[in-house]
Amino acid sequence: MYANGIHQDFGVGDKEYEHNVACYNEESGREFRNYYDKEDVKGMSAVVLWRPILMDGPCTHKPLVVCDATSVKMDDVIPTALVGFLPDGK
């Protein structure tokens, strides 16, 4: 299932992130690139939080957890792709 494991949706670097953002809004992709290419920018981090809606009580099934990215070794990363998911087909 989609969210039963640690995952992220934006790629592993600035080029993949820029591409994914630009697929939905070209201006946002350009803005990201212009900002990222500034001399004082040293890197990036994408943090995405989802929240449950229409709840009648506290979340007891699959509550939000946060993964410290520094605890994940690159050898444990499994790159994947969804072909045809983005508007440009990539």
Image (spheres, helix red, strand yellow):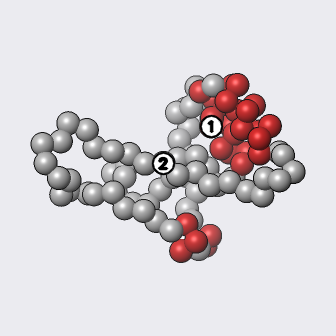
Residue 83 shows up from this direction: yes
Q: Secondary structure at mark 2?
A: loop
Q: Is residue 5 above or below residue 22?
A: below
At x 43%, y 48%, the residue is 49
Q: Is residue 50 left or right of residue 27?
A: left
Residue 13 placement (x, y as % from top left)? 69, 53
Q: Is residue 6 above or below residue 75?
A: above
At x 38%, y 45%, the residue is 50
| Number of residue marks | 2
> Could you say which quadrant of the image residue 28 lies in?
top right
Q: Is residue 71 left or right of residue 62?
A: right
Please name whichever residue, 85 or 30, is drawn nearer the observer in this view of the structure. Answer: 30
Quadrant of the drawing holding the C terminus = top right
At x 83%, y 45%, the residue is 37
Residue type highlighted by circle 1 = Asn
Residue 1 placement (x, y as % from top left)? 33, 51
Q: Residue furthest left?
A: 56
Please name whichever residue, 75 or 55, is drawn nearer the observer in this view of the structure. Answer: 55
Q: Residue furthest front?
A: 40
Q: Secondary structure at mark 1?
A: helix
Crowding at mark 2 (Cα within 10 Å: few <14, some 14-19, many 20+): few
Which residue lies under the disc numbered 1?
20
Which residue lies under the disc numbered 2?
48
Please name whichever residue, 42 or 88, is drawn nearer the observer in this view of the structure. Answer: 42
Q: Earlier in the sequence, mark 2 or mark 1?
A: 1
Q: Nearer the viewer, mark 2 or mark 1?
A: 2
Residue type highlighted by circle 2 = Val
Please name whichever residue, 67 or 82, is drawn nearer the observer in this view of the structure. Answer: 67
Q: Is residue 20 left or right of residue 31?
A: left
